[in-house]
Image (cartoon, helix red, strand yellow):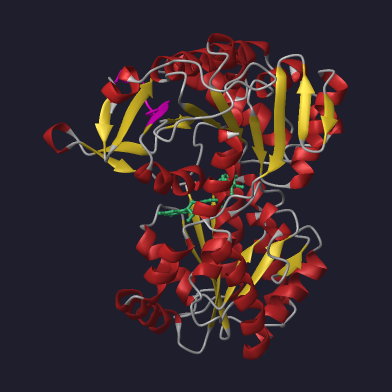
Amino acid sequence: MMNAIRGRSTAPKGRGRTGRSATRSSDSSLIIVANRLPIHRVGHGSKAHWQSSAGGLVTAVAPVMQSTPGVWVGWAGGDAKIRPFQHDGMRIRPVHLKRSDVEHYYNGMSNKTIWPLFHDAIRAPEFRRDWWESYVEVNHQFSRAAIAEASDDDMVWVHDYHLLLAPAMIRKARPRLRIGLFLHIPFPPEELFEWLPWRTQILRGMLGADVVGFQTTGAAQNFTRLCKAYCDATAHGTTLTHAGGATAARAFPISIDFDWFDQRARSAETVRRVSELRNRVGKERKIILSVDRLDYTKGINSRMDAFEELLDRGLSSVADCVMIQIATPSRDGVADYATLRDDVEKRVGRINGRFGYPGRVAVHYFRRNLSRDDLVAYYAAADVMLVTPLRDGMNLVAKEYAACRSDNSGVLVLSQFAGAAREMGRALIVNPRDTDQFVKTIDTALRMRRRDAQTRMSSLRSRVKAHDVFAWCDGFMSALRG
Ligand code: GDG
């Protein structure tokens, strides 16, 4: 494939008003540029091999890369220098990060500045010049790798908040490339974004793309207002015109591979696992499930508080229901995450101490990565799913749950602050900070009549099926092709 990329003609194609190439040949390659590679190394010595990784971005983009010739530029984790290689039909180009970059660019600027700021400043963002300098340098490094892989006919698709400067850096070296940027997390309103000492540089970095995609229209509008204020951009519909050319800023709500989840949930193996799980927790009890990365944006503590109050007020009991919280370990290098873990574990201990009895635990808490098949079995077993982040770009878990409810049973309780709430209005929508309303909504979900639940779930499933990850990708890619 590499020969095909390098050997392809770089003759100019049709050019748009901005001087950027406006059409692509059908055999253009796609170069994905993302902080992490879609695979990670497992095992040691002769048994070491690469395995697909879990996570929002990987889940969403991997199926697309199976069907399009492409390259994935990203960090492999750790500090080993790894040469480019081929994996499962895809060229992998690892970017090497120094330990100090992991500390400053990744743990620092990405996860202690941008992540909290873009999530409503749920934790106070820190602003450090040395982190910023490292962020600039690492963005250059990713950009150089992308430039080395791309011929002028190819498309480059940059992902997420770690690489907001890369579109303009790549554009500078290769003015005619088609460049897309998709932001997986929210884009904040002016009054928060303006805190950033490097706000203009970041906006200009993003404007290097031909298409900037967001999870919601609200996020795209926030970006548009800021570009008008700080980059002299003018807006016509969803197109921003600025000194560097034109950029489309629009919502492309991300989704899941609906059919994969649907079929897996219907399989005999899943049916067997569900029945085993039900027998273990007690057939008569309703299962309330949550699945999150262990992150303070996901609202795990407020959810535990609501569940505790539900039991405390006697609205439900441990004989009637059980909560299962799957919490995937995340960002262990950031102190806030260790504190969160302690807080969550204290709450689980307290609730079990107060309400559990022999043979009946109130909260089952798993802090580990499960296989996708295990996850599907939990989704298929759960009577009520709580997806209640304090702020979330989209939240794929909400969509995965709906996809696993092939008989239309199950009730989804969804935070109004998840991007998914824009599309999944037939869920029970909650404000997770309003404990009173939260407790009542869990109670309503537990008591909902089967027919009402089925009407809601059927509508949720239709929406997710019609707007699956392939539709998301087609939508973004056709905008990118111009
Ligand atoms: C970011 C944005 C946006 C979870 N635990 C396990 C596991 N998972 C999988 C889920 C789901 C994914 O990870 C999590 O996706 P989310 O959307 O919930 O969240 P983030 O990781 O925060 O992702 C988010 C997303 O990007 C996509 O744009 O929706 O708003 O924050 O697919 O199934 N998978 C396996 N084992 C686990 O234990 N195998």
Say left or right for 426 vs 384: right
Q: Is residue 87 magenta?
A: no
Query: Dividing the picture into quarters, in which one does residue 146 lie?
Result: top left
Q: Position of residue 391 (x, y in %)?
A: 71, 48
Residue range in magenta is: 71-82
Say left or right for 131 vs 375: right
Q: Quadrant of the N terminus?
A: top left
Q: Position of residue 151 (x, y in %)?
A: 42, 19
Say left or right for 414 vs 403: right
- The foreground one among 69 and 454 is 69
Say left or right for 32 vs 446: left
Q: Quadrant of the C terminus?
A: top right
Q: Position of residue 107 (x, y in %)?
A: 55, 27
Whether residue 417 is visible to the viewer of this picture, yes or no, is: yes
- The foreground one among 349 and 448 is 448
**Residue at horizontal 41%, vertical 26%?**
75
Query: Dividing the picture into quarters, in which one does residue 239 lie?
Result: top right
